[in-house]
Image: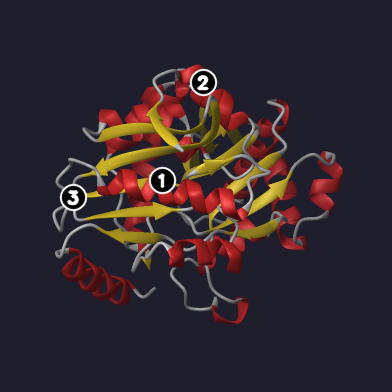
Amino acid sequence: MEIKEITSKDAWENFLLDCREKTFLQSWNWGEFQKTLGETVQRLGFFKGQNLTAACLVIKVKSKKGDFLLVPHGPAVKPDSSGEERLEILSSLVKELKRTKENVHYARIAPIWERSEANEQLFKELKFKQAPMHVHPELSWLLDITPSEEELLSAMRKTTRYLIKQGQKTPNLEIIRSRDIKDVEQFNRLYMETVKKHNFHPFSLKYLQNEFSAFSKDDQAVIFLAKHKGVCLASAIVIYWQGTGFYHQGASITSKIPAAYLMQWEAIKEARSRGCSLYNFWGVADVAPKKLKGHPWAGLTLFKQGFGGQSTPYVKTQDLPLSARYTFIRWFEFLRKRKRGF
């Protein structure tokens, strides 16, 4: 198997069209966004003869604890790839990562592959270690949005359906769809209020603006603003890419007005109007339901699950050590994870 860098946006996106296990984190525009952050990006294609069998975005991430290579939700492979073919792809990737001339201490792969014993075994065979922390969702909540609006509403949790209808009846509550980058600042103001409430590490305004800009060029990003009497109560940045709507960034403040519920329903309807078949609510708590209480993501998880759908677990994030310093980094991350309560 030969690995070549892919430099054509059309070739990259057309290959991904045929892949089932994918998110926008492997898209061309996600790579362009990473470049605006100063990261080094490679788009690797895995070829058998002239046939492209897999694709993999590799990002060099600068970090105070030690630079590393990140493969976000990849590699992307064709739906009919056998376990043997996947092992060959991973083996080729390992060789390529070990040959890197970048000064890095490890490679971190956040696979989008189904969490199965067979897929997990592939990483074990190649001496990967399960990462102490994840960087992208390992369990997403997906909703099939091909049924009618009436069917989707009837499949929701009773409370969720009620709050959407209440939102529709609430005077002066409006849901604004914006493609103006200036409205990222409105999102950010609400986002920072959410940060104070839930105490998590936020993305910077520049990060959010660059992400929105990278996808809005191809009309793949929409900012939703839920306002009541001119006051913004909830907001979201949703990415629409290759048949799926991704609820990627969200923010809201506590209110008796069900703005967030109505906004989410409008984002789903936008996905339907664009011909999408799936709506991806992004990450939910990767714990058993009986352990959800007290989890930092408990409220967010229950909110997303109320719209109906099902969980989709991916193989846990995997690390490939590339230097002796990795051992120190690993223990540091274990301690940080425990401190955050995960």
What is the crowding at mark 2: few (fewer than 14 residues within 10 Å), some, or many (at least 20)? Answer: few
What residue do we see at 39% from left, 29% from top?
Answer: 4
Of residues 256 and 320, the one drawn nearer to the viewer in this rendering:
320
Figure check: 254 above or below 213: below
Kind of residue indicated by mark 1: Ser
Question: Where on the picture, by quarter, is residue 240?
Answer: top right
What residue do we see at 39% from left, 46% from top?
Answer: 93
What residue do we see at 50% from left, 61% from top?
Answer: 122
What is the crowding at mark 3: few (fewer than 14 residues within 10 Å), some, or many (at least 20)? Answer: many
Foreground tag (3 vs 1): 1
Q: Position of residue 271 (x, y in %)?
A: 66, 33
Left or right relative to 44: residue 281:
right
Which residue does the numbered mark 1 point to in the structure image? 92
* Mark 2 element type: helix
Kind of residue indicated by mark 2: Ala
Q: How is the image coloured?
A: secondary structure
Left or right relative to 287: residue 251:
left
What is the crowding at mark 1: few (fewer than 14 residues within 10 Å), some, or many (at least 20)? Answer: some
> Tags 1 and 2 in contact by the CB under 8 Å rule?
no
Which residue does the numbered mark 2 point to in the structure image? 11
Q: Position of residue 204 (x, y in %)?
A: 27, 41
Figure check: 238 above or below 327: above
Q: Which mark is residue 104?
A: 3
Distance in Å between CA atoms under marks 3 and 2: 29 Å
Of residues 46 and 60, the one drawn nearer to the viewer in this rendering:
46
Distance in Å between CA atoms under marks 1 and 2: 21 Å
> Quadrant where the C terminus lies?
bottom left
